[in-house]
Amino acid sequence: MARNSLTITPLTPAIGAEISGVDLTQPLTNEDFDTLNQTLADRQVLFFRDQAKLSPEQQVRLGKYFGPMHTHPAAPTLEGHPEIFVIHTHKGSTIANGNLWHSDVSCDEEPPLGTILQLHQLPSNGGDTIFASMYAAFDSLSDTMKEFLSGLVAVHASEHVYRSRYAERGVEDAGKVYPSTEHPVVRSHPLTGRQALFVNRTFTTKIKDMTDGESAALLEFLFDHTEKPEFQVRFKWATNDVAFWDNRCAQHLAMWDYWPEERKGHRVTIKGDRPFHRAPAT
Ligand code: SIN
């Protein structure tokens, strides 16, 4: 499928597209922006191969076409560039970022719309990132379950995720209050109008107005459901590849199967809106 100067190659029926014909170190044309913005919402994650290493300024400029930059509540950033989250795992690491299913920072009231990651250093093998379509996860449910879930609200917390998480990378967080908020269990995508499941194993701790037992059982069902392989695409990185994912309709998990080898890159996140649910007109 060719549009403008870009070529879009879908990767699985549910999710993912490889994009060629654009040099991300250069400003985007209006046409390219429109195509990427719509394709991101439709395919949920875009992969760009054969890219040059982006400077921090070029990566931030790319992100800002899609919205203002989001600031991460906990992660270590690049000196002089607070918008750049440095992804870095090596022999001395005791944790790796994102190695449990999540939608980025869903504990924020206005979670990031999208995330752009470029990896500059890779292990000799492994370190793939897996993405899952929350449109497909929602669409595959029965009408009865869709209706039931559409009235529910979930708590997304982060104290248990972020407290002392980055201490080994020099982040001191004594006295810091980490975000916690509530979001609809099913959210509508503002661009496509499609409905997506919006609960994840990292941040979602409770379904509101249910007993602890009911909430735990329902969340376990939903986590298992959202993590099914048929909703997924798996990306095998090459140096300087770029992945751009839409946190409103996709979750992801970064494999940490390469210890003691090193994996390093830069990530920016784009500010999003407050999630909402609107049933589509029938
Ligand atoms: C993340 O941003 O969650 C990490 C993704 C990755 O390192 O592949």
Image (tube, rainbow, N blue to C red):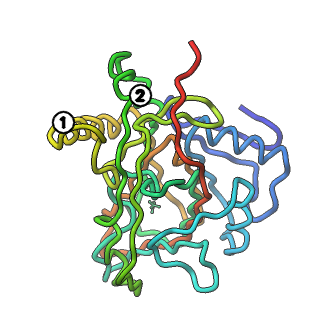
| Of the pair 143 and 242, the residue shown nearer to us | 143
Quadrant of the rendered image containing residue 52: bottom right
16 horizontally vs 262: left or right = right
Q: Quadrant of ligand 1?
A: bottom left
Q: Residues within 10 Å of mark 2 (few under 14, many from 20)?
A: some
Q: Could you tell me the amino acid type at mark 1?
A: Glu
Mark with earlier residue (1, 2)? 2
Mark 1 = which residue?
A: 214
Is the CB–ligand 1 distance for label 1 below 8 Å? no
Residue visible at 58% across and 61% down?
A: 269
132 horizontally vs 78: left or right = left
**Pointer 1 with pointer 2, Cβ within 8 A:** no
Residue visible at 76% across and 34% down?
A: 2
Residue 202 position within the rendered picture, expressed as x and y whole percent measured from the top left: 33, 55
Q: Is residue 268 above or below residue 195?
A: below
Mark 2 = which residue?
A: 150
- Rounded to the nearest angstrom, the CA distance separating label 1 from label 2 is 16 Å
Residue 50 position within the rendered picture, expressed as x and y whole percent measured from the top left: 65, 58
Q: Quadrant of the N terminus?
A: top right
